[in-house]
Image (spheres, rainbow, N blue to C red):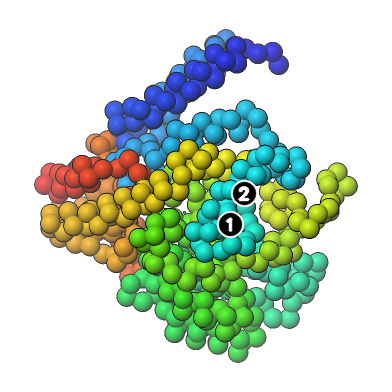
């Protein structure tokens, strides 16, 4: 393929479009209005000339489509689930990753990329409280949670590595709160455990796992001939921001000889501020932790992280030898031998670059800012007559208004009508007690108090309409 355009011209154009996308995000409707036939026509038009357009022309139209035909997750008045403001240097690093395209499947093939990623991973591990760790960047929390479950399974049931789960006399089961993320359903099915092996434990009044019920469930399963091996603590549930009692779960996991995994996909945010680290006290006692950089650390999708103290378990799950790859030559396995993906993108580079540019202190300030906005939003909502329906100190607020039902509005309609005006965006959620409320999460460091006021104003408008 010959170059259609001068590479420098193409990439300068992309950089300019990206800068404009960031700089002018407030000028765009949060929920892009372009859709239906108009969108279909414009997409079709891009391909009609069969290659007759310049790269800048195509890129400009693609940027326009992304700006008008998607929900603008980077908008400061976007209150949907967990999308941060993207740092320009993180976006720039993603472009460099695409241009150099280093292959991280093995260590020697991409020494520099590994060295940079390691700095970022080590920083996160220290925030957890670990000096020693294994782990890697993943494409997201689903991937990290799946890999961790595979690792715990391989460690506990070595026989199943060759012979499969059917060779086991006692079926393996694991535990998680009714509120825990449903990525574990997928993982349980994928790994051959079956979805029923994921034992959902009831939650208490604050939507956190009921440890007594958990203990009973484990005892019953043991009596029934099952083998409990793994328990999930969620630090910041997706629906309501609930933080399971990490210390109690660590005690229980130790007593019961079970692997404790903490899913801190977005609640991990609190780790980066000494002022809020206490919220996750005990997380350091987990065997493994999931944190999504793409939710908490101002880098683009998809950048998750899996960190574990069980160095050998990842290799037990994913280790393999092949004639066309370097084997295990050092005291460390190669990256392709400790994770599900084979080829690996330099997923962690945007975070490494952001850390080098701003230092860890910037993340502390951002975490404090988000936590404070959460508190302010709760206060603003109460003052405006709304009712709060969750208990977390994290910046996630589930709320309703006494007038909402009188107006015959469902929470989903309320959100849809508010979103349709384009100034804010949020979504409903279903809570553990079965009620549906609206949910606002604050994950963007560029969000300001005025954005919170705008949210309250837009929601009230629908009540008064
Ligand atoms: C978002 C989320 C996940 C899934 O992560 P992805 O990055 O979307 O794959 C898992 N667990 C929790 C608690 C989450 O909030």
Residue 376, percent from left and from top: 22, 54
Crowding near pointer 1: few (<14 within 10 Å), some, many (20+)? many
- 241 over 250 or under it: above or below: above
Residue 24, percent from left and from top: 33, 27
Find residue 118 and name its label.
2
- 347 over 277 or under it: above or below: above
First along the sequence among labels 2 and 1:
2
Q: Which residue is mark 1?
A: 306
Q: Is residue 316 visible?
A: yes
Q: Nearer the viewer, mark 2 or mark 1?
A: 2
Q: Nearer the viewer, residue 218 or 409?
A: 218
- How far separated are the C-alphas under marks 2 and 1? 12 Å
55 left or right, relative to 317:
left
408 left or right, relative to 207:
left
Q: Residue at left 72%, top 65%?
A: 312
Q: Is residue 63 visible?
A: no
41 left or right, relative to 107:
left
Residue 400, percent from left and from top: 22, 58
Q: Secondary structure at mark 1?
A: strand
Check the image and name the residue furthest to the right: 323
Q: Quadrant of the N terminus?
A: top right
């Amino acid at each position: 393929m010959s170059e259609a355009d001068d590479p420098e011209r193409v990439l300068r154009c992309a950089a300019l479009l990206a800068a404009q996308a960031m700089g002018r995000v407030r000028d765009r409707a949060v929920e892009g209005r372009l859709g239906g036939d108009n969108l279909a026509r414009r997409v079709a038009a891009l391909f009609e000339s069969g290659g007759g357009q310049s790269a800048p022309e195509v890129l400009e139209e693609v940027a326009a489509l992304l700006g008008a035909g998607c929900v603008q997750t980077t908008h400061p008045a976007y209150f949907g689930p967990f999308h941060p403001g993207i740092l320009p240097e993180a976006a720039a690093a993603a472009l460099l990753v695409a241009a150099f395209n280093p292959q991280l499947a093995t260590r020697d093939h991409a020494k520099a990329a590994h060295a940079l990623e390691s700095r970022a991973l080590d920083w996160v591990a220290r925030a957890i409280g670990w000096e020693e760790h294994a782990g890697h960047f993943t494409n997201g929390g689903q991937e990290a949670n799946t890999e961790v479950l595979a690792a715990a399974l391989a460690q506990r049931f070595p026989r199943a590595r060759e012979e499969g789960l059917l060779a086991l006399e006692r079926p393996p089961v694991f535990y998680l709160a009714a509120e825990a993320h449903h990525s574990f359903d997928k993982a349980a099915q994928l790994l051959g455990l079956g979805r029923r092996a994921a034992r959902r434990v009831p939650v208490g009044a604050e939507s956190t796992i009921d440890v007594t019920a958990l203990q009973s469930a484990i005892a019953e399963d043991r009596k029934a001939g099952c083998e409990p091996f793994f328990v999930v603590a969620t630090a910041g549930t997706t629906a309501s921001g609930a933080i399971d009692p990490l210390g109690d779960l660590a005690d229980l996991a130790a007593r019961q000889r079970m692997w404790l995994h903490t899913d801190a996909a977005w609640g991990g945010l609190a780790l980066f501020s000494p002022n809020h680290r206490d919220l996750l006290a005990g997380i350091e006692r987990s065997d493994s932790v999931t944190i999504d950089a793409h939710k908490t650390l101002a880098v683009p999708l998809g950048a998750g992280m899996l960190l574990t103290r069980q160095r050998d378990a990842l290799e037990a799950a994913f280790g393999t030898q092949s004639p066309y790859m370097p084997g295990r030559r050092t005291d460390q396995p190669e990256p392709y031998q400790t994770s599900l993906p084979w080829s690996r993108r330099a997923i962690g580079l945007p975070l490494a670059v952001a850390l080098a540019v701003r230092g860890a202190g910037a993340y502390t300030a951002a975490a404090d800012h988000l936590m404070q906005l959460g508190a302010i939003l709760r206060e603003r909502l109460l003052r405006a007559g709304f009712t709060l329906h969750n208990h977390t100190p994290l910046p996630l607020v589930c709320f309703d208004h006494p007038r909402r039902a009188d107006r015959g509005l469902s929470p989903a309609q309320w959100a849809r009508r508010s979103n349709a005006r384009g100034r804010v965006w949020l979504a409903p959620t279903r809570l553990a007690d079965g009620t549906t409320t609206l949910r606002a999460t604050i994950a963007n460091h560029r969000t300001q108090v005025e954005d919170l006021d705008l949210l309250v104003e837009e929601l009230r408008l629908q009540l008064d309409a």
